[in-house]
Amino acid sequence: MPPPAPTSSALPALLESTHHLLARFQSLLLNSSASTASQSQSPESSSTSPPNPLSVLADAAKLLKAHTTKLGLLLLNKPFTPSAVVKVLSEITGTCLPAMMGAIELLNTPSGVCWGSCVEKHVKSKVNAVLGAVGELVKDIERVAKGEDAARTQKQSDSTLASTGQVWSTCDALVTISATSPADIVIKKAEEYRSLLRDAIDELKEWAEEEDEGYDDEEVSDQDSDVQFGPSKCPTNKPELRAQVEGAVKKLKLVEMGYKALGKRRLKTFPFEDVGRPNGQTDETVKAQAGVKKLDEVMDLLKRIPEDVDELAGKFYELDEKGAVVQLQKCCDSAINAVVLVKNGWDDSPEPGQDRAFADWVDKWIPLLRSG
């Protein structure tokens, strides 16, 4: 016997439950961790190789996009049919969204599928964007269902087109992820951190280049922004500070070189294809997971460095020379730690032949950062 057809009275309840579902899923994305998800799996569940989570996300996104197209047409065309909306929205809440959340759990399981926190955070941000876009679409459905858009002006139709377009866009982003290797995601993120570092270096260089004409500490009023935030240029009466900034910039450029070398020699060669393919906790799986843990440590350090450089700039702007020394050392230490972690490869084994080039480069690079 077929299930009873949905009635118009079912729509308000479904809309309310959808809001609750979206809020719960967004909370899970915010609060869940790789270790918790991993520990929640039973040993039996790790006996078979799970599907690729990025492929699951892509399939769910394509299906969600198709359902969203149907919803958009139902909202734009008259008469409004609540039962048809219920049917499509139920498919979204019962199939597409749970599949996406399931894929998030698949990112880290004891069977070895462990993409690392960098990839996981990136994927979570994209799924969260999908949930937010679906939430806007649900609000548009509510407006139509309550009769607020009975006249359906062009502006209101544009609102529906915008909300459906937002879902399409976020779904396309998930599909793109599936066509992108995890290594590419990590490399792109490292490049973003490097770009932030470069911007901070340029800012420091500009600050130290030449002091504004007419600058005089005694003549600046309390209302002047220089008093509140420090001088907009390095004061001419502090040549030692200027020299210190120039020295810091040179070292930070060496740090930036570390980003480039890491990306080329290590991040691009991370063996993601070996992660999670074995069934159960084999030696290869344990080895792969150790590599992912090391990758997370490297990426955390690369993320921290631009933040520390901002703090370094703050010390200079405050004319705190001693504080700047400490902060610069912190930046250099983080860069050295990141590079040393993978000096001999992801599994710490000695490298034969030309692969030894990176380790040799590190041996020359570290003394330059530690000098002075």
Image: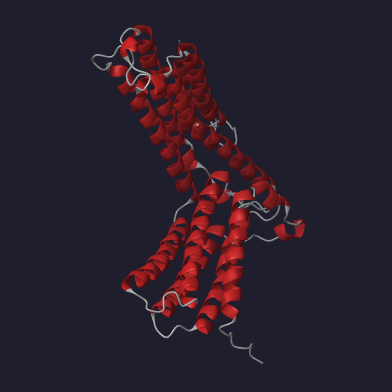
Q: Position of residue 12 (x, y in %)?
A: 57, 75
**How many numbered callouts?**
0
Is residue 49 in view from this perspective?
Answer: yes
Quarter of the image for the N terminus: give it: bottom right
Question: Which residue is nearer to you in this view: 113 or 32?
Answer: 32
Question: Which residue is nearer to you in this view: 230 or 107?
Answer: 230
Scheme of image coloration: secondary structure
Q: Position of residue 356 (x, y in %)?
A: 48, 29
Left or right: residue 3 versus residue 150 is right
Q: Position of residue 215 (x, y in %)?
A: 28, 14
| Residue occupying the point 54% across, 53% down | 124
Left or right: residue 27 versus residue 309 is right
User: Which residue extends farthest right?
Assistant: 43
In the depicted structure, whether residue 277 falls above or below residue 84: above
User: Which residue extends farthest left?
Assistant: 213
In the depicted structure, whether residue 261 falls above or below residue 110: above
In the depicted structure, whether residue 280 falls above or below residue 213: below
| Residue occupying the point 49% across, 24% down | 331
Quarter of the image for the C terminus: give it: top left
| Residue occupying the point 59% across, 82% down | 9
Left or right: residue 236 versus residue 82 is left
